[in-house]
Every structure is written in structure tokens, then in C-alpha cells.
Amino acid sequence: MTIPASDPKSVTGKPLAIEESVDVLVVGAGPAGLEAAIGAAARGLNVLLVDENPVPFRTMGDDVPLHFGQGMTASARNRNAMMEAFVASEPRIAEAFEAGVDLRLGTACWGLYANGPALGWMPGLVAGLADEERSILVQARHVILACGRRDMGLGFPGWEKPGVMGATAALSLATRYDAFGPRRVVILGSGTEALTTALALREAGVTIAAIVEQASRPIGDADLLASLTAGGAEILTGHVVRETTGRDGVEVALIATLDGEGKPAGDERAIACDGIVLAVGATPVIDLIDAAGCKVAFQAERGGYAPVLDASQRTSLANVFAIGDCAGIWGNKTRDRAIAEAEAARAVAALGEDAAELAAAVPPAPDYDISAYRLAWVRASVIEARAEFHVCQCEEVTAREILEIRPPRYLDWRNERRNDRSLSALLGEGPPNPDQVKRLTRAGMGPCQGRRCREQVAALLALGAAQPLSAIPLAGYRAPVRPMLLAMTAHVPEAPEQAEHWDTWFGMHAQWVPFWEVPARYTVATNDATGPVASE
Amino acid sequence: MSEIKGASVVIVGGGVTGLSAGWWLARGGVDVLVLEKGLIGWEASGRNGGGCSHHHSPLFAEEQRLWPIMDDLLGYPTEFRGERVRLASSEHQMALYGRALRNAERQGFQSQVLDLKQAKELVPLAGDTVVGGYHYKFGGHANPHRTLQGYAWAMQDHGGRLLQHTTVTGFRTEGGRVIAVETDRGEVGCDSLVLAAGPQTGRLSAMLGQEVPVQSARCEMIVTEPLPLMPLGGVDGCGLYGRQTLRGNLAYGGGPHEWLALAEEGTPGKPTTPLMLHMGKRLAQLLPKAAHARIIRSWAGVIENTPDGRPVIDRLASQANVVVATLSSVGFGLSPASGRAIRDLVVDGVCGFADLSSFRLARFAELEPNWRELQGWQVTAATESLAA
């Protein structure tokens, strides 16, 4: 009997079609990514820098990768103009070209794969890249992730209307593309991120009608606040948005004061506006980081779930670094890009053999409790909402349906024999797990890949279980971290030996022998594994 | 010192097999406790295609009898829908897939052979990329997550108990019987024990001196954004298994697996790979009119196989009050029947509705000790060094 070197139906010996190999792949061409790419190129390394921006208009419309909230003007359809505007808005892009960096804009990284305890198939670090035309696999000796930030979603009745958007999306449209639709906005939140967003929007010609803050006093820098009030923006602390109304989009924000228990009370007031900017929680973009298997943890000083890093910005995965906003967001870092650039420089220094051990650059202690702050927003805006609305817009799931773990409405499940299967019954003794909840309610399972609702769902579970946000596990991210057309998958060729042995399941002859033909004894020597097989 | 009240039957493993057994026992009035090291259904039970048409299995007839009534029996939705269409991309594949018809017909279940025209009529998203297929007038598919939670809740409705985040560390035996299960939270007394711990079943049974031979592997699936519902969601083939969910997503898997060295404890990571692309390519071949749909997630599961890929559901010869159960990578669809079979073995000593002789552990009595190597089921060098 011949002994097979390996199971032909397994991945062993099935090469992946790697189109390119580089020394360093940098994902994200913001301040940190540019500094890293330019620095690595200066060391003589072969550097590929990708940035998904400008993303196609349709993708923006799906709120990927940011919560654009249909806030873009028609000029965002002009891809060439968007590309030119993107390049012009950041002088270091030209510098990167001159430094010999292979810079590809409009190219997203949808997956990053590394070997680990449950994966040994990869030839090294492998990244999946896609532009509008093609999808390819690239191998890199080092990967530096500079994926930036996005914003926690915050729902209220009407929040699905065009004009409700995240601060990062608003900033990007207004300051980089000159494609920001709203002319008069209400901003939710008063942290440094909210206030810098307000100032930048004002600079871009947008009127700031009001800053709405649920807390009893503003939480951001006093100097930023002073410049805003000097410009005529109203600061409304102890307030929350009750609803937004309008025919085809936001026309009015109805706001109300909060009582001592954080519940809306008192008279409502209508503020005319055509945009509501959500700036209550800037969040590191860790989708690639988590999907690749890097260790992440809730770190309040870094703005929530963020990668666990050493002093050289190394993640827990060998040769994978995280820098810039995806490595952590705090007030000073938002105001001064030199902090992100210094992170990039530390990562680049660590690429060489001669890397010196550096002192850790520790973020300052947060000046407010981000868990309590974000939970207070969700309590006041979502739990105390006067009408039901969809927290998960893609799958149309309400806060109540999430907390009561209700089967999705499309099942039309009428058996109400047991309706006490709420969150507490699911929990047992452990903390509520958002992955478990999303599988049962479908919240977060839609095409926006949970970008608009995942932090809200975590907050709802924390409130439901009377736990801090840090107790709620991270809902896992999986590739593709950007939606990928089925039609594009065929761009990456399949190894012929893989195609030859492809089977529905394990491809084992003995597994599918009907039970009336099964021999009494099984040994490898007597097993007939010859001939064609198809698993069922 | 134990902090956990013992039970008449303790089941180790909160996957579909263990929870179905727990539910069958509880609904028969047996005092049952399921121990799960993490969250229920976190391994292979929550990560499969949801198919329910296993015509090669002695549990097939019971599988077919039970699925259409599971929503009513459990009191919770499983999203079961009957029937399956299997399309072939070549005449060779068409011939290979034909075995199902013969197996099913012998057991009294009908199917129809589809030519290209009929296939396209039955499957609106299909196209000229296939040559034909089969329409099984049996089987079907259900939602694994919902079904699994349904078992757990229904078991609890009947007084069964479930303890998550509880790791089994050993067993206490006396007079050829297991009298207690040792856990990281104390000892749990039992009259009978069921081991249905998926990939861990091998390691746990070895502690009792009678190892169920298994090896773990990682398999992967992809899911697209929702599309308009086809009249029959249970459409697969072209080298893929899977279904269109009742929400409209296309959820499919297939292709090569990777054999893994199993971590002693804890929940293994479940990374996906670029295999996603090659599944996507086949899905676009199976349902070309869905080529504009986008993949929005992929996932992987770690799942065990016995040397012949067939289940073990048997009482241990060494400890008569222990039932071991692994469904060997094909467990979800059979779970209504496998749980009942385990209930029968525990309570009656023998399965009353099916011939389980092909599931006996004794079939491996003469198995070569180096069977993994002989079958080429080695782990890759990379995972081996990382696991060390």
C-alpha cells in the first residue's frame, strides 16, 4: 500500500496565486500611513501603499467604509474629480510618489491572513486587495496597518434619513473632496473629536446650528468650545435628539432636555438643519486587525476596542504593526498629526534588524469615562426613544427586538408560548455576547457589515446586563472587510491541483458508504479509497 | 468542594448533538445537565450549511420524519424548509451526485432528474453554467444558530439545565462506572455520562481509557448580501453545499480543509483564508444571476472526523454508563435523530428506532495506531510549531 504524503483533499500543497510580493504593505494613506510608507522607502525597502479612497459613489451610498448618510453631493459621482481632490488635499501623497512608494488609491484591503494555531496554509503574510476592476493577493514581509477611524452610530427616530452621518464621513466629504451636501448641521457630542469636526466644517462654509450634548457640561477642550461659540454655534448640554423629520431627508432636529435620570423631559424645540453629524464616539477601525487575528482589547484611553501593541506599534501577530487612529484615538492625537506620525516612525524603525527598544508611548488617561458617556447617549437616545426605530438599518432590527432576542420579523413567528427568552435567559452567568445576539436577531448582519450599529448593539447589551462597555466582548470581524462582488472572486486564479481535488466536503469515500454496506471493521489498509468520490 | 448540583445524566458538550440529546432526555422527564466549555454552538454546530438530507445514514428515516415537525416539538423556530435541488456543472459531477437518488429510493424517498431547462425553471438564479441536476423531494435545510438555541431553550423548558463557561478536567470512576465529572468549577455527580464534545471527544474519551479516534480540521463558508427569495432555498451543487437563507442571503461552503493539531483547552481561533475567493467563483457558477451580489462575510469552523468519517454513537465497554457520540463532521442535519438515539442508549440501553451497528466504536479495534499519518491527515508544519 502506498502512503499518501498528504490528504489530497486538504489544503496541503495547494499554492495560492500570489500576484506580487513586497517588503512592506501599508494600508491607509493618512498621516500615519504616509509617514510609514515614505520612511520605509527611505530605508530602501520596496513599499506598497494602498488606500481605498476615494471609494466609489455606490459604496459611499452603502455607508462603507464610513457612515456617509447620503451626505455627499452629486460631484462625488465624478471619480476623476474625487481622485484629484483626494491627492490635492494631502501634500504628502506627492511626496510618497517621489520617494518611490508604489501608491495605489481607490484600492481597498479586504483581508489579511497570517498563520497561527488554527491556520498553517499561508506562505507568509497575505493580503487581499481590490480596486473597482480587480481583486488580487499580495504577499508582504511586513504589514503596517493605518486604517483610520470611523464613528459610533447613534440612533433616534428618523436617523435613517439622508443627512444623518458620522463625523469622520462628514469631515472627509467637506475637507478633502468639497462634496459635502448639508449647509446647516447639528452636531451630537462635545468631545474633542466633535468640536474639531465642528470647526473644520465651519471652515468649509457649513453653518453649525448647534452642538447637542447629553452630558450636563461639554466634555471637550474649552478653547475649541470658545471658538465655536464665538462663531455663533449654540451649545446645548443636557439635551438629546428626539426625532428628525423631513420629507426626503433631514429638515428639522427635534431636541429635548434631559432630566436628572437622563430621560428626555420638558418641551421640545425644533432646530432647522439639513444634516445631523454623529460625533459621540470616534472608533479605531480594527476590522482588518481583528479579522487577521491580532489581539485586541477594550482600552478606554484608545477610544474603545483597539489592538494590543508594544512600544514599536507591533501587534500580537509577527510583522504586523498598527499606527495612527486604528491604533487608538485620543484628544491630542486628533488635534496633532505629529503623534500619529511618530507612531509610524517607531514602526518603521522596528522593521530593521537593528531595531532599538523604545519607551512605550502611552496615551494619556482619558479625561472622561468613555463607557459611561457612550452608554448615557444610547440610554437617552435609543432606549428612551419615543418611537421604535431600526438600530440595525440593514436588517431592520429595533432596540427592543435586540434586548428581547426576538426572531427576525420575516419569520413571522407567532408562537408566543414562551416570551421570556430575553437577554437574561440567554446569558446564564457570562457576559452578553454580541455575536450570539446577532445570530439570533440578525442585528449587524447586513451589507454595511455592522458599521452603523455594532457599537450601539454592544451598548444596548451593556445596558441590558448592567455592565460597563468593556465587559461586552467584541463582535468578531471577518473577511472580506469590504463587501466583494461574487463576480470579482474569479480574478484570483485557483491552483489546478486544488480544482482537481475540490470536493463539497472532506471527499472521504468511507464517509458516504450507505449504512447497509458498511464493513464491520475499519482499517486504513482495508479501506477502499480508490475511484471518484463526491461528498453529499 | 462542588458548587454545582449533580444530575442523573450529565452531557459534556453544548453543540447540536449534546443539546438535542439533552432536550430528548429532558422532555422524557430525565434530570439532565449540559456542560459547555464556552458558549453553546460556538464550534461546528453554529458553523455549517444547515442541510438535512443524509440518505447514507441509518438515522436518515428519523431525520426525515422529525424535521418537518421540529418547530412544533421545540416551540422555537428552526427555519426548516423542505426539499433540495442539487445542480451539476459537468456530466461527471452529474454522475457522482446521482448516488443520492439510489440511496433515497431504496428507503422510499423520491427524486427527480432535472435537465438544464427544468433546472433553470426551478432555480431562477441558475443559468447555462450547469448541465442539469436533481430535485430531492425530501431533505431540506434549517438555520443552525436558531435550531441550536431552540434545543437549549426547549431543554430548559422541560427542566434541563445548561452550564456554559465550564471546562471538564477529568472524571471520577468507581466500579466500572463514571460517578462524577470533574470541572474547573468543581465536581458534578452523575448516574450516566454522555460525551458529545466535538473535537474534544477524542481527548475526553482517552481519559476513560477508550479513545474515540478523531482528528480536527478547519472548514470555511461564505455569505452574500440578501437577494430576492427563490421558490426553493435549498439549492447547492457545483462543488458547494449550502442554501439561500429565509432572509435571502446565499450561504455556501466547500473545498479543501486543513487538518489541525487541537489545542488542549480553550476555544480555538477560527481564521478564514482566501479560499473564500474559490468558493465565490463556484457560487457564481452555481447561480450566475447572483454574480452581482456581494460577499459580506466568511467564517470558519473547526470540526472533527473519525478515521472513516462515520459517526460513533455507542456505549463504552469499559464504563457501561457512558455514551460517546461524535457525528464526524456531519452532525447538524441529523441532530434531531442523533439526540433521540443517544436518549435511547442512555435510558433503554439500545436504540429503538434505527440500527446503529455501523456507529459502533469497536469497528476501530484493529485500526492502525498511525492512522492519521497513513491517511495523510497531518497538520501543516506551521501550525505544528505554533501549537507546540
Image (tube, coloured by chain):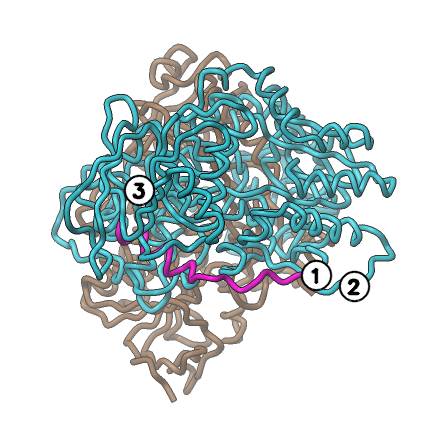
Chain colours: A cyan, B brown
Q: Badge 2 is on which residue?
A: A357
Earlier sequence position, callout 2 versus callout 1: 1
- Categorize mark 2 by other alpha carbons within 10 Å: few (<14), some (14-19), many (20+): few
**Which residue shows up at 24% across the image and 72% down it?**
B31
Q: Are marks 2 and 1 in contact (CB under 8 Å)?
A: yes
Instruction: Residue at 42% x, 33% y: name it.
Output: A447
User: Residue A155: which numbered mark, if any?
Assistant: 3
- Residue A369 is one of the magenta-drawn residues: yes
Find residue A490 and report its image quarter.
Answer: top right
Residue range highlighted in magenta: A360-381
Image mark 2: chain:
A
A209 or A126, nearer to the observer: A209
To the question of a shared chain for discs 2 and 1, the answer is yes
Q: Say which element carries label 2.
A: loop
Residue B357 at x, y = what percent?
41, 56
| Residue type, label 2 | Glu
User: In which chain is the residue bearing label 1?
Assistant: A
Q: Is residue A8 magenta?
A: no
Mark 1 residue type: Ala
Q: Which mark is residue A311?
A: 1
State the SS at label 1: loop
Real-space Cα separation, disc 2 to disc 1, in angstroms: 8 Å
- The residue drawn where x is 30% and y is 70% is B33
Quadrant where the image shows the N terminus of chain B: bottom left
